[in-house]
Image (cartoon, rainbow, N blue to C red):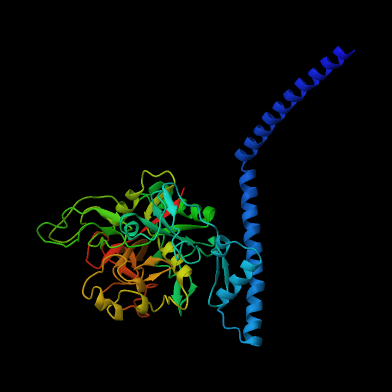
C-alpha cells in the first residue's frame, strides 16, 4: 500500500509540473497577442493620462490655496514655488514636478514625459533636466555632467511639449496667440498632394504631425545650425567647403545658405557665385541629412507650426514674444555690444539670449522655415526670429513672419535651425 501511495504522489507531481509549463506558455502567448493588438499599449497610455489628470487636479487645488493664502495671509512665495512644495508634500516625485508648469495667467500645464531617442541621453544638469524648464538631450550615451566640452562637441536638442489641439500656426499679439494666420501664408506649400510631392514635405509634414500627436511633442535644436568655419562669402570662390556642426555651442552660424534650389526642389548643389545664389546644399537638405540613417528620429528644417508651438511653450513674463528686444541679439539690445555688435554672434554666446534652454531663437540670424507666402506672381518661404541688424520690437520680434523672396538666394543674416520628430 505504501508503494502504491508513493506512485500516485509521483504521478501528481509530474502532472503539476506539466500544467504549470502549459500555463506559462499560454500566458506568454496571451501577453504577446495583447501586445500585438495594442491593448497593453493603450492600457499604459490610459494610465499615463490618468496620472496626468491626478497631478493636474492636485496642482489646481494647491493653486487655489495659494490664491487664498496670498489674499488672506500675504503669501510671498510665487505660485510655482508654492504649488510644487505642496505637491512634493503629497508625495509627488521630482520627476513628476518637472512636468508641471504654472503659467503667468494661472493656467496650469502638466506635460507628457518625453521619449528620449536612441543614441541620445537626457541631461542631469540642474536647469536642463526638467520638461517645464526645457529638457535638454545630448547626442551620445555618455552621461552628461557640468562639462563645457559636452556643450561644444555634442549635438543638443530641447523637448517642446505640445497639446495636439493647439498645434496650429497662429498670429501673435500682446504676448499671446490670437488666431490663425492670414490665408496667403501657407503650410504646406499650396497645391501639394501625395501624388505631386516634389519637395518631400507633404509626406514629411504628415509623419511629423502624427509623431507629435503620439509622443506629445518634438525636439528643437538648442542652438541655430552651426558651421565649423566662418561662412564668409566671396564673389570668386563662393563659400568654399564648410562642415555642418548642427546644434552645438560656440560654432559659427551656418548662414549664407539658401532654402533650396526652388520652391519645388529641396535638393541641389549648384553654386552661382556671382549672384550669390544657392551656395551649396540648402537648409532643407542639410537638415534632413543630419539624422537620415537614424531609426529613432527624423531631422527636418523647422516647420512654421513648430515655431509657433515653441512660442507657446516659452511665452511668459520673462520672455515676451511680441517684443523680444530684451532677450535676443538685436541692434537695440544692450547686451549685444559686448558680444558681436556688427555681425552674427557664435551660437549660444550669451546666457540672456535663451528661453527654456533654446538659444538665439530671437535675433542673431533670421531662420528659414518650411512655411510659405503666396501672392499673384509666385510663392516664397518664410523666415522667423529676426536678425542682429534689426530690432526686436513689435514689428520685427521673434513671433513675426518675414518673406524671403528667393528661396535659393543667400545672405549673412539668414540661417536655420534643425528639428527632430520621433519615429
Q: Is 116 placed left or right of 222 in the picture?
A: right
Q: Is 268 placed left or right of 371 in the picture?
A: left
Q: Is residue 277 above or below residue 321?
A: above
Q: Is residue 195 above or below residue 312?
A: above
Give the camera-side residue of 230 and 87.
87
Q: Residue at x 35, y 65 (%)?
A: 374
Give the camera-side residue of 70 and 275.
70
Q: Residue at x 60, y 83 (%)?
A: 75
Q: Is residue 193 visible?
A: no
Q: Is residue 419 above or below residue 133?
A: above
Say which quadrant the N terminus sits in: top right
Q: Is 162 placed left or right of 231 in the picture?
A: right
Q: Position of residue 204 (x, y in %)?
A: 41, 51
Question: Furthest-left residue in view?
Answer: 236
Q: Residue at x 34, y 68 (%)?
A: 360
Q: Position of residue 235 (x, y in %)?
A: 11, 61
Q: Position of residue 289 (x, y in %)?
A: 32, 49
Instruction: Tell how many labels.
Output: 0
Amino acid at each position: 500500500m505504501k508503494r502504491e501511495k508513493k506512485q500516485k504522489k509521483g504521478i501528481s507531481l509530474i502532472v503539476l509540473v506539466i500544467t504549470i509549463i502549459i500555463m506559462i506558455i499560454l500566458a506568454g502567448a496571451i501577453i504577446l497577442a495583447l501586445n500585438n493588438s495594442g491593448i497593453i499599449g493603450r492600457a499604459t497610455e490610459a494610465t499615463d493620462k490618468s496620472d496626468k489628470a491626478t497631478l493636474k487636479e492636485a496642482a489646481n487645488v494647491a493653486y487655489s490655496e495659494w490664491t487664498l493664502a496670498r489674499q488672506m495671509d500675504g503669501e510671498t512665495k510665487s505660485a510655482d514655488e508654492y504649488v510644487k512644495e505642496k505637491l512634493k508634500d503629497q508625495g509627488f516625485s521630482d520627476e513628476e514636478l518637472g512636468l508641471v508648469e504654472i503659467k503667468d495667467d494661472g493656467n496650469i500645464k502638466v506635460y507628457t514625459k518625453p521619449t528620449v531617442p536612441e543614441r541620445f541621453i537626457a541631461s542631469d544638469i540642474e536647469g536642463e533636466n526638467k520638461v517645464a524648464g526645457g529638457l535638454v538631450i545630448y547626442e551620445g550615451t555618455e552621461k552628461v555632467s557640468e562639462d563645457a566640452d559636452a556643450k561644444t562637441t555634442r549635438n543638443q536638442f530641447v523637448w517642446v511639449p505640445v497639446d495636439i489641439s493647439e498645434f496650429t500656426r497662429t498670429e501673435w499679439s500682446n504676448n499671446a496667440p490670437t488666431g490663425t494666420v492670414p490665408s496667403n501664408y501657407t503650410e504646406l506649400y499650396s497645391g501639394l498632394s501625395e501624388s505631386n510631392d516634389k519637395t518631400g514635405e507633404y509626406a514629411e509634414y504628415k509623419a511629423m504631425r502624427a509623431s507629435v500627436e503620439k509622443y506629445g511633442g518634438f525636439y528643437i535644436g538648442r542652438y541655430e545650425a552651426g558651421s565649423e568655419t566662418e561662412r564668409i562669402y566671396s564673389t570668386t570662390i563662393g563659400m568654399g567647403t564648410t562642415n555642418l556642426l548642427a546644434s552645438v555651442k560656440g560654432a559659427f552660424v551656418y548662414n549664407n545658405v539658401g532654402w533650396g534650389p526652388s520652391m519645388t526642389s529641396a535638393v541641389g548643389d549648384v553654386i552661382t557665385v556671382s549672384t550669390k545664389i544657392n551656395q551649396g546644399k540648402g537648409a532643407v537638405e542639410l537638415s534632413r541629412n543630419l539624422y537620415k540613417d537614424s531609426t529613432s528620429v527624423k531631422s527636418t528644417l523647422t516647420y512654421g507650426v513648430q515655431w509657433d508651438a515653441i512660442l507657446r511653450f516659452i511665452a511668459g513674463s520673462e520672455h515676451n514674444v511680441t517684443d523680444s528686444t530684451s532677450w535676443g541679439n538685436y541692434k537695440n539690445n544692450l547686451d549685444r555690444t559686448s558680444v558681436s555688435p556688427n555681425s552674427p554672434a557664435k551660437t549660444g554666446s550669451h546666457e540672456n539670449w535663451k528661453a527654456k534652454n533654446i538659444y538665439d531663437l530671437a535675433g542673431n540670424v533670421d531662420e528659414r522655415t518650411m512655411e510659405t507666402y503666396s501672392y499673384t506672381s509666385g510663392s516664397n518661404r518664410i523666415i522667423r526670429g529676426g536678425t542682429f541688424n534689426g530690432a526686436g520690437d513689435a514689428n520685427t520680434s521673434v513671433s513675426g513672419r518675414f518673406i524671403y523672396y528667393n528661396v535659393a538666394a543667400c545672405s549673412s543674416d539668414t540661417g536655420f535651425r534643425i528639428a527632430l520628430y520621433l519615429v
